[in-house]
Amino acid sequence: MSRRLGQQAEQQAIAYLQQQGLTLVACNVHSRFGELDIVMRDGVYWVCIEVKARASHQHGHPAEFVNAAKLDKMTKTFVRYLIDQGLNPNHIPQRFDVVTFNNDHLQWFKNIAG
């Protein structure tokens, strides 16, 4: 995804999720393990959100690009982020969501880690 498309998708995802009642905590969090696109709160849950956008179906659905390796990197980065915020990841309700854009169609997949 191009940087511009990615930034637009992230901003649209934030706006949509805020309309759904989530609260923005951080964007583009970096650690030695990787990057988190968006961190939000949904009630008691700390939510790590990956945003994927594609301009066409040519290379598959955007959600297909969040595989086990990507989820592992997200988990390590999220744990590091929570620790850096003075929180204990073992005692914080958390989940991993994906927001996809495919031809401007938004889909929100909650709790992808199960």
Image (tube, rainbow, N blue to C red):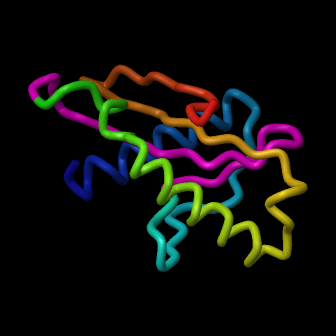
Residue 25: quadrant of the picture: bottom right
* Magenta stretch: includes residue 17: no
Is residue 107 placed above or below 41 in the rendered structure?
A: above
Residue 77: quadrant of the picture: bottom right
Q: Where is residue 54 in the image (x, y as percent from the top left)?
A: 23, 35
- What residue is drawn where x is 69% and y is 51%? 24
Is residue 98 placed above or below 90 in the rendered structure?
A: above
* Magenta stretch: includes residue 45: yes
- What residue is drawn where x is 61% and y is 41%? 96
Q: Position of residue 81 (x, y in %)?
A: 67, 69
Q: Secondary structure of the magenta portion, mostly?
A: strand
Q: Position of residue 15 (x, y in %)?
A: 57, 39
The answer to whether 96 appears left or right of 84 in the picture is left
- What residue is drawn where x is 69% and y is 41%? 95
Q: Position of residue 19 (x, y in %)?
A: 67, 30
Region in magenta: 37-58
Is residue 38 placed above or below 15 in the rendered structure?
A: below
The C terminus lies in quadrant: top right
- What residue is drawn where x is 56% and y is 45%? 49
The answer to whether 67 appears left or right of 27 in the picture is left
User: Between residues 39 and 59, which one lies in front from this camera angle?
Assistant: 59
User: Between residues 29 and 82, which one lies in front from this camera angle?
Assistant: 82
